[in-house]
Structure formats: C-alpha cells, structure tokens
Amino acid sequence: MGEFRTHSQLIEAALKRCNVRPEEKAVMLSSRIIDPADLAPYEEALRRTSDHVISVRYHPMEVTDAHHMNDMLLAAMQQADFVLHYRGGTFPTPFAQLTAHSRGIPEVAASSTRWLDICLNEANQFRLHPSDEIVAEAMEAARLMERTNEIHLTSDGGTDLVLRKDGRKGHRQLGLADKPGIWDNFGFAMVACAPLENSANGVVVVEPGDAMLQMGATVRDPITLRVEDGRIVKIEGGESATALSQWLERWQDPESYGVSHIGWGLHPNAVWTGSPRFTPVDGESYRGSILIAFGSNTTDMPARHSGIGGTRHCVSHLDVPLLSHSFAVDGVPVVKSGKIV
C-alpha cells in the first residue's frame, strides 16, 4: 500500500490533489445499483476534505442506453464545486452509467465544476495511483499532443494510418481534477486527441491480444480495418472481425464507424490483456500502447487539456487499445513498436 494505510486515505490523497477544500460543495455520485457498503471509503474521504457533502444516487432507468443525464440530475451537479463519481470496479457494467461521453458532463464542467470518475476496485486503485512523475509526464505529453498537426500510426503487422488534428485539443487523463471545468478519471495515465473527422486514411491491423473494451473482448485473430475519409469502410479477418462487424452494425449509425480519438498510454504499472489484473484502465493506459477509438467524440470541457472536442455524434463508442504499434507526431516518433521513445 506504500504511503497509504487505508483505502479511504488513498482516496483522501486523490481529493486533496484535486484541491477539494472544506468550504466547497462536494457530491458523492453513484448509481443505485452500486452496493451502499462499497461507497463508505469514498464518503469518508469526502467528509474529511469538505464540510459540505451530499450523496446522490441515480437510478439506472434515469439514463438511457446512450448514458445521458436527465435534467434534474444535471441541475444538481451544476451547483457543486466537485463531483466524485464512483462507477464500481467492473467494466463493461450490466447497466447504464454516466461516462465522459454522456450528455450532461460537458454542461456540468461549463459550470466550473470539477469532476473525478473512479471505475477501479480497491486493489487496482492502489496499483494505478498516479505518482508525481506520472502526472508530470502526462501533462507534458498533453502539451505535445496539443501542438501536433499530423499523426502517423504504423506497425510491423501492416498498420499504416495518417490522421490530421490541426487545432484540436491535447487531452490528458491522469486522475487530476484540480482546476475549474475539468473532468478526469482516476488511475489513468494517457493522452489523446480527436482527429479531424474526415482526415484518417489507411489501414489499422488489430492483432491477437489487443482488446475491444466496450465489447468486453480480447482479439483472438487479426482484424484489418480499412479507413477512408475518417471511417472504417471494410473489416477483414476471422472470428474477431465478425464480432466487431456485428457490434458496429447493431447501432445502425454510420458514425459508429468513424474514428473518434487516438493517443498513447504512459502508466508504468498498467498490465496487458493476458494478466488477471487487466482492466479497461490498463488497456487505455498501458505504457507504450496506442488507443484508437470509434464513435462519439464530442466530449469537451472548458479546461485546456480536458476533453477532445470533436464533432462526431452517435450513441456508440468503442475503445481499441493496440500493442506493438508506432506513433509519430509531425514526423517525430513518440512510441516505437510499443515502447516510449
């Protein structure tokens, strides 16, 4: 456990890093499906950092399959200085929950509310708690991504994809909601951007051992994705390719095939898909991995490096972390064959 003797102390440290203060209005937010006993360490930590804490539990039926806030919940969150949203320790969840891609999160951030998600169990929170070094590296990577115009993704397996992001944000996730208008996710260490929606062209080869997170699946055999003008136009391969095709078809929306965001992971303590400790946080944050996603990318927050700010709107979102890929920004390598340069 290192410097933390109890779970609530770890959460308290995360809240203090987010600048939660006694005079601030703080909300403990969770779905009613979450066992109330599981919320105890989070509520305890919040009450040690803020003198004005309320707990709000939304019913799963209050959000749609697209995971949107209703107006009543939105209005309540907009009045808070800080929201701690515990989503449980398993993913995908069997019920609708709010995510960064939900309608309502950007509106809450626009009210200067700071928002921290947690979607890890206790053991993985200790393992993935961000060090000061991780925070500093992720912030520097976000600044680099912000300056970037062209991205080139390649692999020995056949990936060759070029994307443009001129003018788009460099987004970071590192568990730090310390300034007004920031949404973040505890335990992550990664950067991303929303490429210009029609800019991606080329081929992505998803290899065995890679993952399709919202599908809850590990790739079993190679998948070749042919991308033209920002969208997947052809999916080739075997069993895993068929599963991906069926998942995308179910949404009956051409935007589900569009490139949403892309970036790389930085966490030295993350594990890959073969580990029993693997979580989606690991998949998105594994050091030297590349995360490419398809579907919605409109999420944006007022803070400089929070949100990706694309224009692709749909009800689906699929994160596909890739290992053994290379990533270059404006011709300069950042990741080479799964290793940070």
Image (spheres, helix red, strand yellow):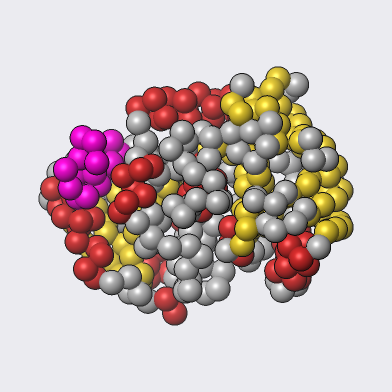
**Image location of residue 313, percent across then percent down:** 66, 59
Residue 37 image point, x, y percent:
21, 68
Instruction: Confirm whether residue 261 shows in the render.
Output: no
User: For residue 107: magenta?
Assistant: no
* Front residue of this view, candidates 13 and 85: 13
Residue pictured at 30% horizontal, 54% vertical: 122
The C terminus: image quadrant: top right
Quarter of the rendering occupied by the N terminus:
top left
Q: Please name the residue shown 56% across and 69% down the image.
A: 66
The relative height of residue 72 versus residue 232 in the rendered view (above or below) is below
Which residue is at the far bottom?
Answer: 61
Query: Does 9 appear in magenta?
Result: yes
Determine whether, in the image, residue 175 is placed left or right of residue 318. left
| Residue 330 showing in the rendered view | yes
Q: In which quarter of the image is residue 49?
A: top left
Is 225 placed left or right of 101 in the picture? right
- 77 over 267 or under it: above or below: below
Does residue 320 appear left or right of residue 277 in this picture?
right
Q: Point out residue 67 in the picture as x, y percentages from the top left corner.
A: 51, 67
**Left or right: 229 as drawn, with respect to 197:** right
How many numbered circles are shown?
0
In-front residue for pair 165/139: 139
In the image, the segment drawn in magenta is 1-20
Q: Where is residue 48 in the image (x, y as percent from the top left)?
A: 13, 48
Which residue occupies the foreground of this view, 129 or 157? 157
Question: Which residue is depicted at the point 75% across and 56% down?
Answer: 221
- Who's the residue at 47% across and 74% down the image? 95
